[in-house]
Image (cartoon, rainbow, N blue to C red):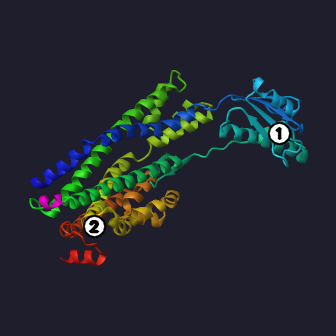
Amino acid sequence: MNKILLIIQREYLTRVKKKSFLILTFLTPLFFAAMMIFPAWLAMHNVENDENILVIDRSGLFTGKLTDSDKLHFSVQDISLDKAKENFYRSGYTGILYIPHAPEKENPVFYFKKQPSVVTLQKLEHRLENILREQKLRKALGVSQQQIQNIKADIHIRTVKRDESGAEEAKHNEVSMGLGMFLAMAVYFFIFMYGVQVMRGVIEEKTNRIVEIIVSSVKPFQLMLGKIIGIALVGLTQLTLWIVLTLIFAGIGQSFLTSRLPQGPDTRQLMTQMMQHPSDSTAVTALAGSNAKLGQTLEIIGSVLSLPWAKILFGFVFFFLFGYLLYAALFAAIGSAVDTQEDTQQFIFPVTLPLILSIVMMQFFIMNPDNQLAVWMSIFPFTSPIVMMLRIPFGVPWWQIILAAVLLAATFLLMTWLAGKIYRTGILMYGKKATYKELWKWLRY
C-alpha cells in the first residue's frame, strides 16, 4: 500500500506543479463565470447602437409609418439616392434605407458606415414587413389601423412540471438543454484529457525503460493503479478549484446584476422570495412589473435556481470520477501494449466508440431526454457518464441514477482487473506490435 501511495504522490505532484496546470486552473473559472453571467447581462442591457436612418421611400408605402424607437430613428426625405450617397459622410446619419417602387419584387437596400448588428437588421425587416402586411389587410378586409393593432398579440408560454403528488415546478427547457450539454462535454473532455495522460505516461516510461526499474520494486498492477489514482486526484483537484472559483466569480457577477435591477422598497424582499422559491411566479411578476424582457430574464434565473442541483452535483462528481477511472484503466492497458503513440490508433477507436457515439447523438438525447434509448444509454456503463449528464438537468429519478452509478462502479472494477492482466504482460514487451489476438492471450494468462 505504501508503494501505491508513493506512485500516487509522484504522479500528483509532477502534474500540479506545472505552469500549464496553474494557468488553466485559474483562468477557466473566469470563462465559466462569464458564460453564466454574460447572457443575463445581455438580457438586461440593450447592446444595440443608436441608428439615425435616412429613408428614401420611392414606393410611398412607408411614409409617415416608420416611427422612432429607443435605438432606431427615421427621417424620411424625398431626395435622390445619388445625392444622399454623396452627402452621406458629411451628414449625421448612420445609414440610408432605400426602398424601391415595388419593395416586394425588388429588395430594399441599407447603406451603412459601420456594420449594423444582426438585431438591428432584423428589426428593420420586421418593421417593413409589418407595415406592408397591415396595408394589405386594410385593403383586403377594410379594417382600420387601430383594429389591426388591437388584434396583435405577444404570447410567451411558461412551462411548469407537475408531478404525481401535485407539486408544480417552473421549468425552462433552454436552461436544462444548455446545462446538460455543458456538463456532458465537460465529462467527455475530462475523460479524454486525463485518460490520454495516463496512456502517454505509460508509453513514455516504457519507451525510456524507466518501467524496468520501477517494476523491480512494485508490482505492475500497483504501478497501473497508482498512476490512474494519482492522475484522478489531479483532475479532482482541478475540478474542485474550478467549481469553487466559478461560484465565487459567478456570485460576484450575480451581485452586480442584482444591483442593476430596478430598486424599490420591496425589491430586496421580492428577490429573497424568488431565491427561496424560484418556481413561484408571484415574485417574478412583482419584480418585472410591465417589463416583459425583465420578466423573462427573471424566469430564466428562477429556472436555474430550481434545477435539481443535488442530483446534478452528485452525478457530475460521480460520473466524472468513475467514468475517468473506467476509461483510464483501458487507456493504461493500451499504453502498455504499444511502443509508440502512433500504434495506439487501432485500439483507441474501439475503446472510445461509446463516448463518441454519445456525443454524436447528443442532439437527439437533448430533444428527447425521456426516450427509451436515452434512458438505457444513460444506464449502460460505457455511455452513462455522458448521457446521464445530458438527462439529469431535465429531471431523472434517483433509482435510475443509483442503478447507473452501481453498474458503472462494478464495470470499473471488472475492467481494471482485465486491464491489469494486459498491463502486467504488455509493460515489458518491446519491439513487437500487439494485436487483438495477442491481447486475448494476455487476458488468459
Q: Dots 1 and 2: beta carbons under 8 Å? A: no
x and y percentages locating residue 36 in the rendered image: 46, 39
Between 431 and 319, which is closer to the camera in this rendering?
Answer: 431
Q: Which residue is mark 2?
A: 338
Residue 42: say if magenta: no
Asked whether, in this view, residue 1 is left or right of residue 259, the answer is left
Quarter of the figure with the C terminus: bottom left
Between 103 and 435, which is closer to the camera in this rendering?
Answer: 435
x and y percentages locating residue 106 in the rendered image: 84, 47
x and y percentages locating residue 423 in the rendered image: 21, 66
Question: Which portion, as a residue range, is magenta?
Answer: 209-214
Asked whether, in this view, residue 69 is left or right of residue 41, the answer is right
Between 24 and 277, which is closer to the camera in this rendering?
Answer: 24
Assign a secondary structure to mark 2. Answer: loop
The amino acid at mark 1 is Gln
The amino acid at mark 2 is Val
Q: Point out the tag, 1 or 2, that comes first from the N-terminus.
A: 1
| Mark 1 surroundings within 10 Å by alpha-carbon count, few (fewer than 14), some (14 through 19), many (20 or more) | few
Residue 210: say if magenta: yes
* Distance CA(mark 1)–CA(mark 2): 78 Å
The main secondary structure of the magenta stretch is helix
Q: Residue at x 89, y 42 (%)?
A: 101
Q: Residue at x 44, y 56 (%)?
A: 391
Between 136 and 321, which is closer to the camera in this rendering?
Answer: 321
Residue 193 visible? The answer is yes
Asked whether, in this view, residue 142 is left or right of residue 89, the answer is right
Residue at far top of view: 265
Q: Which residue is mark 1?
A: 147
